[in-house]
Amino acid sequence: MPLGHIIFDNLTPKLRCEAECDPSFKQIIPYVLVEHKPTGRYFMTTRIGGEERLKGQASIGLGGHLEDGEDVVDALFRELEEEIGLEKDQMSEIQLCGYIYSELNEVDSVHLGVVYHALTDREDIVCREHDKLVGGWFTVPQMKEARRNGYMESWSAVCFDALLDEEDED
């Protein structure tokens, strides 16, 4: 049975305040890398508010927690709309890339990432949650610099190493 079916067939609800302190319970997080199709740049953010454990760290993925009754894809589209104003019909070639399961730190230990890649032609994207995020379009070499200097949060480092770092070799 594919991993996705095992995960999604066994989802159970739990209060977030309880789940954030329980490493035996994994919260499913849609996590999407948004690429500007014409230029090959990626939207990268830095957390300035919200989740204290992630403040000051750069992220090449956008996403967040599922809300009541949502599936992963619905949550992905809702989060993109909330965070950067990107609507479903403004994206193409949305692909599931894989999953991130890590015990590396306190944040990772209570989450499981469902990683997607999506293309958009929109260049005018900005962070809408001004109190939580700042961001913009970055090239792969610029992201490589952030990765090398230790600015990327752990999931972004995993995604960069697995999906993007090889692009810079061409």
Image (spheres, grey):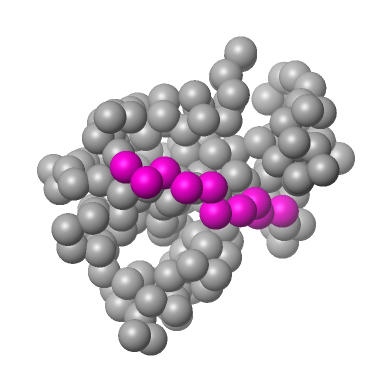
- In the rendered view of the protein, which quadrant contains the N terminus? top right
Please name whichever residue, 23 or 69, is drawn nearer the observer in this view of the structure. 69
Q: Which residues are magenta?
A: 92-101
Q: Residue at x 44, y 79 (%)?
A: 166
Is 111 left or right of 34, judged from the image as shown?
Answer: right
Q: Is 145 placed above or below 89 here?
A: below
Would residue 124 be found to the left or right of residue 32 on screen?
Answer: left
Q: Residue at x 41, y 44 (%)?
A: 94
Residue furthest top as drawn = 69
Q: Position of residue 161 (x, y in %)?
A: 52, 73
Q: Position of residue 28 (x, y in %)?
A: 66, 36
Give the camera-side residue of 93 and 81: 93
In percent of width and height, residue 91 lies at 30, 39
Name which residue lies at 25% across and 35% down.
90
**Residue 19 occupies quadrant:** top right
> In the image shown, does 39 or 28 lie closer to the viewer?
39
Magenta segment, principal secondary structure?
strand
Quarter of the rendering occupied by the C terminus: bottom left
Depicted 139 relative to depicted 81: above or below: below
Indicate whether residue 100 is drawn in magenta: yes
Residue 11, can we see it? Answer: yes
Q: Is residue 50 left or right of residue 30?
A: left
